[in-house]
Image (cartoon, helix red, strand yellow):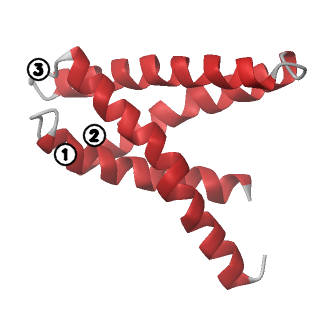
Amino acid sequence: MFILTFVVAIAVGTMLIFLFGRWIGRVRFTLANAFWASSSGHMLPALLWFVLGFLLRMYLGIAFIIGLLVALVFQTGILQFFANTQHEVLRPWRAALIALIVIVGDFLIASPIVELILRATGG
């Protein structure tokens, strides 16, 4: 189930970066760059949340907030990096807004999709 959740989150993140990169960031990400930005932007925060959840198991609220802030900063940097590889400039506040949309999209879009898949397959 963890792998399914991760794959759906990366797919949703890819679509959000691809669509909102043009609208908010005024950067035309290719679908490949949007995919790699989404997958690398989900990799480190997922590992960090795992470690923080273990280390701060008595203070999960604090671990959650720290994880969200690190994910936001890391995803912002990743988006600016991938915009720079395409010889385009993505302003930091626009990158942060797209990163915030991707993080919120993981909770509001990817979670219901995973639940729908699990109910449809009986797993």
Q: Residue 58, labelled with which disc?
A: none
70 vs 119, left or right, is: left
Secondary structure beneath label 2: helix
Q: In the displayed structure, does residue 52 sit left or right of residue 112? A: right
Query: Which residue occupies the foreground of this view, 22 or 88?
Result: 22
Q: Name the residue carrying label 3.
A: 89
Report which residue position mark 2 lands on.
Answer: 33
Looking at the image, is mark 1 or mark 3 nearer the viewer?
A: 3
Query: Residue 75: image x %, image y %?
Result: 41, 26
In what element is the residue under mark 3?
A: loop
The quarter of the picture where residue 84 lies is top left
Q: Is residue 57 above or below residue 117?
A: above
Residue type, numbered disc 3 = Val
Label whose residue precedes the other's in the sequence (1 or 3): 1
Q: Amino acid at mark 1?
A: Thr
Q: Amino acid at mark 2?
A: Asn
- Tell me where residue 2 appears, x and y as whole percent: 72, 52
Tag on residue 30? 1
CA gap, disc 2 to disc 1? 5 Å
How busy is the neighbourhood of tag 3: few (under 14 within 10 Å), some, or many (20 plus)?
Answer: some
Q: Evaluate if marks 2 and 1 touch, with contact meaning CB atoms under 8 Å apart.
A: yes
Quadrant that contains the N terminus: bottom right
Q: Residues within 10 Å of mark 1 (few under 14, many from 20)?
A: some
Q: Distance of mark 3 from mark 2, alpha carbons?
A: 15 Å
Determine which quarter of the picture holds residue 50.
top right
What x and y, as percent, mark residue 102? Answer: 40, 41
Sequence-first disc among 3 and 2? 2
Q: Residues within 10 Å of mark 2 (few under 14, many from 20)?
A: some
The secondary element bearing badge 1 is classed as: loop
